[in-house]
Structure formats: C-alpha cells, structure tokens
Amino acid sequence: MPLTTAPDTRPKTTAVRILNLLLPHHRTTDKPRATAEAFPHQLRRITDFVREGAPVLFTLPGFPCKSPNPAKTLGHLPDMGERLSLTFLDRLCTEIERIHPPGARVVICSDGHVFGDLIRVPDHHIDAYSDELRVLIRQSELPHLSVFDLRDVLGDLPHDTKRAHVHDRYAPTLDGLRAEVRTHAPTLALYRGITRFLVEDTAGFRGTRSALQRECRGRAYGVIQRSRAWGALIAEHHPHAVRLSIHPQPAGAAKFGIRLLDAPDAWTTPWHSAALHEPDGTWSLVPRARAQHLGRLVHRDGRPSHFERARDTGGQRFPATVRR
C-alpha cells in the first residue's frame, strides 16, 4: 500500500494563535465575542503567510484626515490619537513576531484624497495629514508600519483626476448600492453611520436641518462608492493581504474590524475625536468639546496633542493648558 503523509497542521495552529491576538481588539457590534474559528477568511490568509514563512501582511484603509468639525478634533494634523493608534498597531506586529518569527506588517492605506471632495476637507490638509503620518512612523520608530495613498498609485495628477479615475474604474453603481442598503443590514448600518458623521462634520450649512440630512444622505452613498473603489484598488495592489477595517464588522466577514483605542461607541476613530488621558494611565477617544470639559489641553512639540484629566485634589485648580 502507498504511504500517506498526514497534513501539516502547524501553520493553521500558528494562524489561530495570531488571530487570537487580534480578537480582543475586534471592532464589532456582535455579542458575545466570536472565537478564531468563526473567521475562516482571515485564518486562511494568515495560514498561507505562515506556511510560506513570510511576514503576515495587513492592509488597513483609514487615517484619511481630521474631521473638519472643531468640536470634535484639535486641528487638521495627526495628534496623540493617531500616535497611540499607530503605536498599538506596531506593538501588535511585535506580538505576532513572538509567535511567527517573520513577523507582520501593516500598510496604512490613507484614503482622504479618495473622498476629500465629499467630506469637504481641502486636499492640502489631506496631504499634510498623510505626510505627518509618515513623520510619526519614522520618528516613533515603528518599523512594521508604512503609509500608502493615491500618490503612490497616480503620482502628481490633479486630485480631482485621481478621484475620477478610481471611481470610474472601481466603484459600484449607485443603483446597485441603493439596493444593497435596502436589503443588507450591515450596509444599512454603514450608510447610517457615515450619514451621521457627515451631518456632524458639515460646517456653515445655511439650510434647514432636514435639508442638511438629505444632502448628507446623498453624499454618504458617494463616500461608500469611493470607499469600495479604494478597497478594490488596495486588493489589486496587495492581493494576498489580510484586510482590516476601522468600521465594525461581524464575525465571518471578509474584513476584520479592529478597534484602535477605547471609545464610547464602535464607530469613533482618532480622526473624529481627541485623546483623553485618564489619571489611571489609560486613554480614550472623545469629542474635543467633551474632552475640554473633562481635562486640560496638553501641547506637544508646539501643537495641541491631547487632553489630560486632572486627579481629584480637593478643589485645587489646574491650568487649562500644559506645554511639553
């Protein structure tokens, strides 16, 4: 009888261990938390990297630009929220390296230019934000991270030309997307979440609240179209990567939602909020307007960085701003 060789299960076992490192940070609205076996898509891709002895590659669309709403953020450049989030991602790669010596890498796919016109953020602010992300990664010595944006694909073409190219080549049709919103609960939740953000981030609108909501619902479809297009472009450039998402994702989805920092809900991100440092050393993300009621503003390198909640000192007053 011919001899048969048992399949090598070690790569799958290692992949499960790697995914278990991500599960505590799963950004989802699911309850209870799922186990690694509920993520066959991610397990299959991680197993392939382990079997090949290659670093596990993650792509994370996000880190687009700061919200233009001054009640939410400290300005248009990255601050402590981004710094902490990038450090978390790099530390996660280091933890994976202890299990899988080739380690892991995260490509930050900065997508601000993809829909900058729809979210009403100037392109030069988006450029400055993306450039500063690269500076943060270099200065903070985060070797497992890199930044990828439209400039890496289409060079110095005008921003509107880049957006049109990506939309025309990769975006789903508006009719198809509208039908999906009507029939697919996760897409409906995404549509509602983006609409809410657009309403909150719109400044200087002269019409009624209901008119603003109608206008933002239309823009929300465009944001989802462009986001899908950007995802397709990323998949074309990184076809074997494990796809992360900053949006909540259910177990079993093709994308793995990842929570970067503690926040009051599953949708809050560093670019829609400010970082608040608690007396016990923990950090959370809250709107700037709330953070400045809870703590004092801290500057770092001459720029607003975060808020620091003061300890209870029996009524002693603290300065409203600290510079470091």
Image (cartoon, grey):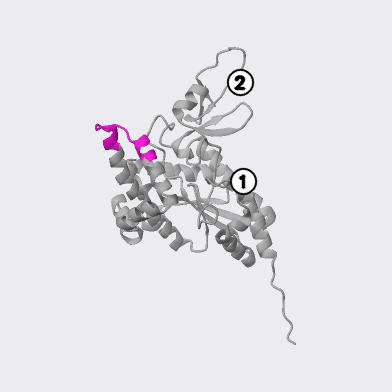
Query: What is the count of numbered marks?
Result: 2
1 vs 2, front mark: 1
With respect to residue 306, does 4 lie above or below? Answer: below
State yes or no: discs 1 and 2 in contact (Cβ < 8 Å): no
Tell me the residue at 39%/43% (across/down). Answer: 192
Q: Distance between the residues labelled 1 and 2?
A: 29 Å
Question: What amino acid type is highlighted by mark number 2?
Answer: Arg
The quadrant of the rendering that contains the C terminus is: top right
Instruction: Name the outermost residue toward the front.
Output: 183
Q: Mark 2 points at which residue?
A: 311
SS under mark 2: loop
- Disc ID at residue 24: 1
Farthest residue, direction bottom: 1
Quick check: can you spot residue 141? no
Q: What element carries label 1?
A: helix
Question: Within 10 Å of the Cα at label 1, are there few (<14), some (14-19), or many (20+) other Cα atoms?
Answer: few
Q: Position of residue 250 (x, y in %)?
A: 52, 51
Image: 44 above or below 127: below
| Percent position of residue 281, x then y | 63, 30
Towards the viewer: 323 or 163: 163
User: Residue at 48% across / 38% down in the picture?
Assistant: 270
Q: Give the range drawn in magenta.
A: 196-212
Q: Indicate the quadrant where residue 204 lies.
A: top left
Question: Is residue 211 highlighted in magenta?
Answer: yes
Q: Specify whether residue 104 is painted magenta.
A: no
Image location (x, y in percent) of residue 190: 42, 47
Q: In this view, does 176 lie above or below 23?
A: below
**Quadrant of res 140:** top right
Q: Which of marks 1 and 2 is nearer the N terminus?
A: 1
Question: Crowding near pointer 2: few (<14 within 10 Å), some, many (20+)?
Answer: few
Which residue is rendered at x = 47% and y = 26% of the image? Answer: 290
